[in-house]
């Protein structure tokens, strides 16, 4: 869509919005498409009507029946001013605080952008209270895999998808064609639910078992069941049965693994201590429910672990190690880092620009006089991009071109004022993606101690459901994870210490150092990645801010001291499990398409896109011993390109692990 077409669509929109009885095709052609031929006009008009419908405007067709046989029927077109508008939504300060917390849950680009767009519409529809998100708690949702955004788009557009899938029940990899009905999280995993066309039945697919990219089919659309609710469907899934594995580990090592395992002494009877073999190793009896999840963890331990049984678990570990070897032996791709852009970004399209301008006008109406850079920051664009939007807007309006028929926007002295808004004072109703982003986020907050007890959570959810209408009902196609930690008592201890400004004494298991350490910490805030929770705290032993996982804490209790550091020392951005530091070592990684999300997880300083959809990324690491574990854990999705010493260490780690399995 060119700038000319963007301007034409805006002119068509304003013409159809500002007619009471509708405009004939001949009138539209004369006013909006003056230089087009009959064929070109028909083609462009039909395409433009479809685009306006995609942007949330229902183009109505009105038929005049005429006065008699000599007066033929006439077709007119118009857009109702109320049918496509978001209703006014008045929110209290408490409701805004809860809503902001829900909107910031999403780390995935598509849902995060949709949530931000929805917030801007609400700000234009009813005004925003000046509130801040509580800094003490920051839950986050990051759907696994790059397939998530593609599946969400296909699900809402109602297009079928294809992908290769490794079935957990049979271990067979097959090409599947599925009509996506819903996406949701269950047992710590994201699932796609939909009609499998080959089997003509509802099936569930775990995103982590996808072995290829997701392709969207252009063979028409489908209609899912009207009463489909992904949360209710996933609730029917039974938890996998509890199984046990026997793994061989060095005596006294791998403390994190031992915390949930049983030692099996020589002779096979269950016990609690003692090496079982002459070479100084222990055999642990390890409970598990999902072999693939456990295999990912065991693969990361490399040569320190050998799976004795069951065979399917050992096979899963070997598959990851072999995949890591194949990637390490493949040719190094040609790449170059983009010096102008440190992070990869989705290309901005003209459709993005038109949507932004439709939000921009009502936003400016309710926020007169903002600094132009502040407006650009609100919409996530540069100042130059915003000024381009404004220049297009002031050239568009009603077809007649009389005074008052064009948008009048001024930004003298860098402050933006809108003088003539052509009654575009209220934003377009929520899209399905925007409704899903906010309503799913609010639902995920239900189990948290602080928001769950707040009546604002229930009231703002009801208001959004009413405002979203049909799009709100379709939000049942998306269900987020349960973000409540299993370590709820630990979470409450930390929350209380943050509120009272108290210090805590911690016994903590470090998997990388394979030791239990004791520390005094000043807790600053709690944050999560799905259902894995962390506390960001000032560690007095390390002399700086560190992150600690709640599920790795052996004990946590107040030590009677007052905290010396507070939340004012936190950065302005969202909390992350991995925080790079200037003194860390820079490592260059090659990431496949499936593993490209690791660049964001580890806050890549710069990236280079590869033709196959993968990335080359520079990340900072504080301890090089962690790199071989990362390569083995994500077997076949990541390898080290530089420095060579770290690349060699990763190769040796994987080869030594394979040697323990006889190859």
Image: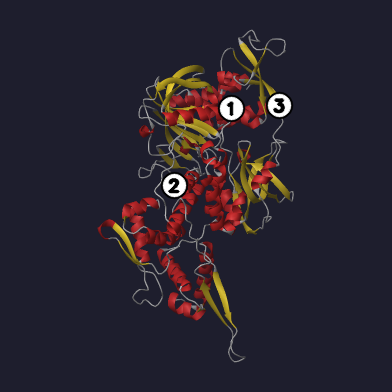
Callout 2: 10 Å neighbours few (<14), some, many (20+)?
Answer: few
Query: Counting residues from the N terminus, which is met first, the one under dot 3 or under dot 2?
Result: 3
Foreground label between 3 and 2: 3
Callout 1: 10 Å neighbours few (<14), some, many (20+)?
Answer: some
Mark carried by residue 297 = 1
Q: Secondary structure at mark 3?
A: strand
Percent coordinates x, y for residue 470 in the rendering: 59, 59
Query: Counting residues from the N terminus, which is met first, the one under dot 1 or under dot 3?
Result: 3
Callout 3: 10 Å neighbours few (<14), some, many (20+)?
Answer: few
Percent coordinates x, y for residue 437 in the rendering: 53, 49
Residue linked to disc 2: 345
Residue 331 in view here: no
Does 576 sit left or right of 158 as displayed? left
Q: Quadrant of residue 248?
A: top right
293 up-or-down from 184: above or below: above
Does 634 sit left or right of 206 as displayed? left
Percent coordinates x, y for residue 59 in the rendering: 54, 70
Q: Quadrant of residue 316?
A: top right
122 up-or-down from 101: above or below: below
Residue drawn at x 44%, y 48% as measured from the top left: 93
Residue 548 in view here: yes
Residue in front for this viewpoint, 516 or 209: 516
Between the residue at mark 1 and the residue at mark 3, the CA separation in whole angstroms equals 16 Å
Mark carried by residue 392 = none
On-image quarter of the C terminus: top right
Mark carried by residue 243 = 3
Q: Residue furthest top?
A: 278
Is there a contact, CB below 8 Å, between mark 1 and mark 3?
A: no
Query: Counting residues from the N terminus, which is met first, the one under dot 2 or under dot 1?
Result: 1
559 up-or-down from 135: above or below: above
């Amino acid at each position: 869509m060119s700038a000319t077409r963007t301007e034409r669509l805006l002119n068509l929109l304003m013409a159809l919005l500002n007619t009471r009885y509708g405009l004939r095709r001949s009138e539209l052609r004369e006013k909006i498409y003056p230089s087009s031929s009959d064929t070109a006009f028909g083609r462009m008009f039909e395409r433009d009507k479809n685009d306006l419908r995609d942007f949330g405007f229902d183009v109505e067709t009105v038929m005049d029946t005429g006065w008699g046989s000599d007066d033929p029927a006439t077709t007119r077109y118009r857009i109702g001013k109320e049918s496509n508008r978001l209703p006014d939504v008045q929110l209290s300060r408490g409701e805004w605080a809860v809503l902001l917390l829900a909107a910031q849950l999403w780390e995935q680009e598509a849902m995060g952008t949709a949530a931000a767009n929805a917030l801007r519409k609400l700000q234009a529809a009813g005004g925003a209270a000046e509130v801040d998100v509580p800094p003490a708690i920051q839950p986050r949702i990051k759907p696994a895999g790059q397939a998530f955004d593609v599946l969400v788009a296909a699900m809402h557009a109602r297009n079928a998808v294809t992908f290769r899938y490794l079935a957990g029940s049979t271990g067979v990899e097959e090409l599947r064609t599925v009509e996506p009905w819903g996406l949701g999280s269950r047992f710590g995993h994201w699932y796609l639910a939909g009609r499998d066309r080959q089997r003509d039945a509802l099936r569930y697919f775990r995103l982590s078992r996808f072995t290829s990219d997701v392709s969207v089919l252009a063979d028409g659309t489908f209609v899912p069941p009207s009463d489909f609710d992904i949360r209710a469907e996933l609730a029917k899934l039974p938890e996998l049965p509890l199984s046990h594995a026997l793994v061989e580990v060095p005596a006294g090592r791998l403390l994190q693994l031992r915390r949930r395992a049983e030692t099996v002494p020589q002779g096979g009877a269950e016990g609690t201590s003692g090496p079982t073999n002459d070479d100084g190793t222990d055999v642990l009896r390890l409970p598990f429910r999902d072999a693939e999840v456990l295999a990912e963890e065991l693969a990361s331990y490399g040569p320190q672990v050998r799976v004795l049984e069951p065979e399917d678990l050992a096979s899963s570990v070997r598959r990851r190690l072999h995949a890591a070897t194949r990637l390490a032996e493949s040719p190094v791709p040609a790449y170059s880092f983009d010096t102008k852009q440190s992070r990869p970004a989705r290309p901005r399209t003209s459709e993005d620009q038109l949507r932004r301008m439709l939000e921009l006008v009502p936003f400016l109406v309710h926020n007169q006089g903002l600094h132009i850079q502040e407006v650009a920051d609100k919409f996530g664009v540069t100042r130059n991009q915003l000024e381009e939007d404004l220049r297009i807007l002031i050239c568009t309006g009603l077809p007649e071109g009389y005074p008052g028929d064009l948008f009048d926007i001024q930004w003298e002295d860098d402050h933006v004022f809108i003088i003539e808004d052509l009654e575009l004072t209220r934003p377009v109703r929520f899209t399905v993606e925007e409704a899903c982003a906010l309503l799913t986020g609010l639902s995920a907050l239900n189990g948290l101690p602080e928001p769950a007890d707040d009546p604002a959570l229930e009231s703002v959810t009801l208001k959004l459901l009413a405002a979203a209408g049909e799009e709100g009902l379709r939000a049942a196609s998306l269900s987020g994870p349960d973000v409540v930690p299993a370590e709820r008592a630990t979470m409450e201890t930390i929350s209380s210490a943050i509120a009272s400004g108290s210090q805590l004494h911690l016994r903590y298991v470090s998997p990388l150092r394979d030791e239990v350490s004791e520390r005094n910490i000043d807790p600053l805030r709690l944050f999560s990645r799905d259902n894995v929770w962390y506390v960001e705290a000032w560690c007095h032993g390390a002399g700086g801010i560190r992150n600690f996982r709640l599920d790795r804490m052996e004990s946590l209790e107040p030590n009677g001291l007052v905290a010396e550091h507070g939340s004012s020392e936190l950065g302005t951005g969202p909390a992350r499990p991995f925080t790079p530091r200037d003194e860390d070592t820079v490592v260059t990684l090659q990431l496949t398409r499936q593993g490209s999300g690791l660049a964001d997880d580890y806050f890549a300083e710069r990236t280079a896109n590869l033709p196959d959809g993968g990335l080359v990324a520079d990340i900072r690491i504080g301890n090089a011993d962690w790199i071989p574990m990362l390569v083995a854990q994500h077997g076949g999705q990541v390898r080290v390109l530089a420095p060579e010493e770290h690349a060699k260490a990763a190769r040796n780690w994987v080869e030594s692990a394979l040697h323990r399995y006889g190859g």
